[in-house]
Image (cartoon, grey):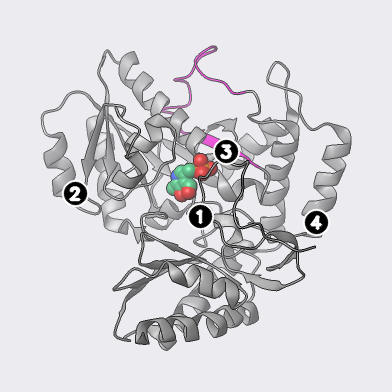
Amino acid sequence: MAFIEASSPHTMNTYGRLPIALSHGQGVRVWDVNGREYLDALAGIAVNTLGHNHPKLVPALQDQVAKIIHSCNYYHVPNQERLAAKLAELSGMTNAFFCCTGLEANEGALKLARKYGHDKGITRPEIVVYENAFHGRSIATLSATGNTKVQQGFGPLVEGFIRVPLNDIEALKKATEGNPNVVAVFFETIQGEGGINPMRVDYLQQVRQLCDARDWLLMIDEVQCGMGRTGKWFAHQWAGIRPDVMPLAKGLGSGVPVGAIVAGPKAANIFQPGNHGTTFGGNPLAMRAGVETIRIMEEDGLLENAANVGGHLKAALASELGGLPGVKEIRGQGLMIGIELDRPCNVLTTRACEAGLLISVTADSVIRLLPPLIMNRAEADEVVERLVPLVKKFLAE
Ligand SMILES: Cc1ncc(COP(=O)(O)O)c(C=O)c1O
């Protein structure tokens, strides 16, 4: 079958797509409809935790599909309780609400923060957000996002956000000084779309202390950097802190759409019946995917693998590219790696695809690698072999 039509007349024109369509995958490899093979160093943007056609996940999902796919939240869904309990165990938090996407989890977190304020008598609650943040594309989450390109054309934006720079505790204190309406601080531990920008460990600890001192909610968006990607279940755990609210999605269902708002004691009882809900959220198929993804990650030691293979991959990239003129920084943790160049390099996505490698470029000049957490060292070496010559050639142009 010949693919690809140059344009898609019936789907909305929202994506600049590469001219391939993927038909199937195995492990960290995928094939397009013309039979061409690619090494997957993107995992559907940090989604395919277990890679493709995982021998333990696929039979579990097949079993679930044959039993019941969807029931709805009028009834109990036993795996909701199982997945919530597991997320509580892994995070040290207590309760979860399930939805389908990252923006939906974030939207719910923003509602939680506002209601937290209202319950305390704050009728115009304000939430601290960050430069270069990305939280989604609903009206509220795009307002929280720190990228004017995402916001352009969709005003008026939702009010009640205070924006601060990353890793600057004094700036945070100054921006909120004497403001009794602040209810929460909201950020990604490692900004994904913003260019793989980590919050420093000492900053995370300082913000936690400040939130405690001021009675604010600490809300950490782990949609992209969470679920084992950095080598811990959640990236903020590297700083030994615990948020009050943690939106999750992407890797949680290894490809089946699942999102969650995980909450600790300070936020777990804010929503009461009628305050929040969603038809598909926590449905039996999605919950089975979440339960099995975590079970398989534990059985197969994928946190350790993400840390080991990620460290190996970053070191190999640093030895090949570090210090080259045009390479500003190679950063990230585990299998969330960014290579920042000194110029826009979006064209590398297409060139990598032509060379049989799936990657992305974000924030215009950051090559982003988010491979499945099952990737081994030999496969990571292959990523380096395919990527490095492309980057060197590009920088020499
Ligand atoms: C940190 C973060 N939050 C939220 C989102 C939005 O998730 P979704 O696309 O599932 O709505 C993304 C997506 O890239 C993200 O990276």
Q: Position of residue 262 (x, y in %)?
A: 51, 35
Q: Residues within 10 Å of mark 1 (few under 14, many from 20)?
A: few
Q: State the residue at coordinates (19%, 49%).
A: 169
**The quarter of the displayed image where residue 140 is located:** top left
Q: CA distance from mark 4 to mark 2?
A: 45 Å
Query: What residue does disc 3 label?
Result: 259
The mark total stands at 4
Q: CA distance from mark 4 to mark 3?
A: 21 Å
Residue 16's disc is 1
Q: CA distance from mark 2 to mark 1?
A: 38 Å
Inspect the image, locate mark 2, and give the three-letter code of the amino acid beneath it: Ile
Q: Mostly what secondary structure, the magenta segment?
A: loop
Inspect the image, locate mark 4, and give the three-letter code of the amino acid beneath it: Lys
Q: Earlier in the sequence, mark 3 or mark 2?
A: 2
Q: CA distance from mark 4 to mark 1?
A: 34 Å
Q: Earlier in the sequence, mark 4 or mark 3?
A: 4
Query: What residue does disc 2 label?
Result: 169
